[in-house]
Amino acid sequence: MLVQLDHVKKIYDDFALELNMQIPENCVTGLIGANGAGKSTAFKLMLGLIRPDYGTVNVLDRKASDMTVMEKEKIGTVFSDSGFSEYLTVQQVIHIMKNFYTDFNENLFQKQCEKLEIPLKKQIKEFSTGMKAKLKVILAISHDSKLLILDEPTAGLDVIAREEILNLLRDYMDTPGRSIVISSHISGDLEHFCDDVYMIHNGKIVLHEETDRILDEYGFIKVPEQEFAKLDKEYILRIKKENFGYSCLTDQKNYYLENYPGIVIEKGSVDEVITMMVKGESI
Ligand SMILES: Nc1ncnc2c1ncn2[C@@H]1O[C@H](COP(=O)(O)OP(=O)(O)OP(=O)(O)O)[C@@H](O)[C@H]1O
């Protein structure tokens, strides 16, 4: 496992984060949650910037809080409040990166900047939001890291800039053995990018599932009230009262299709599944 959080608990005055997470090699993991859900806190734990009150956080086979500077070079990061002084040009940033990272690949970095039209001689403060976001990701992937920890790298971007960033990340994943943990408060952003999704709500994981399973096996059963009464509730995760009766989220769509001929089951997006997990009623 590249990242392993075992029974982790981090407690602040009015907030507690509880996490069990495993991130294997060759895997893109999405961390999805609303503002304040605990995503940045989870990332700070993984980087050893804060310590858990309970449990253990291991990253690249080391206790996160014990990682040396050399070991941290194997992790590429993007945080909303991180980055270089905006008075620098990219050319000056290259100079700093070369001094800071033993494995900084200047050639790859310059190629990516060229491809995404990031000017080398302009001060970063003159960049658009999209250009700054792209620069941060290019920097994170240009020092031969094994793991990327990306906190909302696509926040506030238009569709084209978002796709450009996801394409950079897809190229990064072409090298075997690497993994990405990426957060967003918009699950649709990551739906076709992540292999695995953790949904965090108020500091707790409310859903952990492979994206393919969500798309293939989760569904919304739509039934009138009389049929709802007769429905086997074994594989129903959440329900919601609707005008027509009930909408029921299942993670075993085929069970209901086989046992209830003619039943209406609609496919849900990752977004809809997550909304139902948070807002729907448990049985
Ligand atoms: N150092 C701290 N001291 C006290 N409370 C904190 C601290 N850091 C984070 N919190 C609290 O932890 C909660 C989760 O914050 P966190 O930044 O992890 O959420 P998030 O999911 O990343 O949200 P956002 O999308 O807004 O960045 C919030 O209620 C926040 O106030």
Image (cartoon, grey):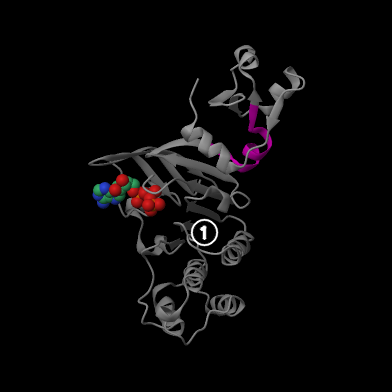
Residue 222, quarter of the rendered image? top right
Residue 192: image x %, image y %? 63, 51
Question: As rendered, which of 98 and 256 lies closer to the eye?
Answer: 256
- Asked if the residue at label 1 sits under 8 Å from ligand 1, the reply is no
> Outermost residue, front direction?
243
Circle 1 Cα neighbour tier, 10 Å, few/some/many (<14 / 14–19 / ≥20): many
Q: Is residue 72 above or below residue 183?
A: below
Q: Residue at x 51, y 50 (%)?
A: 186
**Residue hosting label 1:** 146
Asked if the stretch drawn in magenta spans residue 228, the answer is no
Q: Residue at x 46, y 78 (%)?
A: 127
Residue 80: image x %, image y %? 40, 62
Does any portion of residue 201 appear in the rendered image?
Answer: yes
Asked if the stretch drawn in magenta spans residue 210, the answer is yes
Which element carries disc 1, helix, strand or loop? loop
Residue 46: image x %, image y %? 39, 51
Question: As rendered, which of 172 and 16 lies closer to the eye?
Answer: 16
Residue 185: image x %, image y %? 47, 50
Give the magenta-colored segment's residue range. Answer: 208-221
> Outermost residue, bottom direction?
121
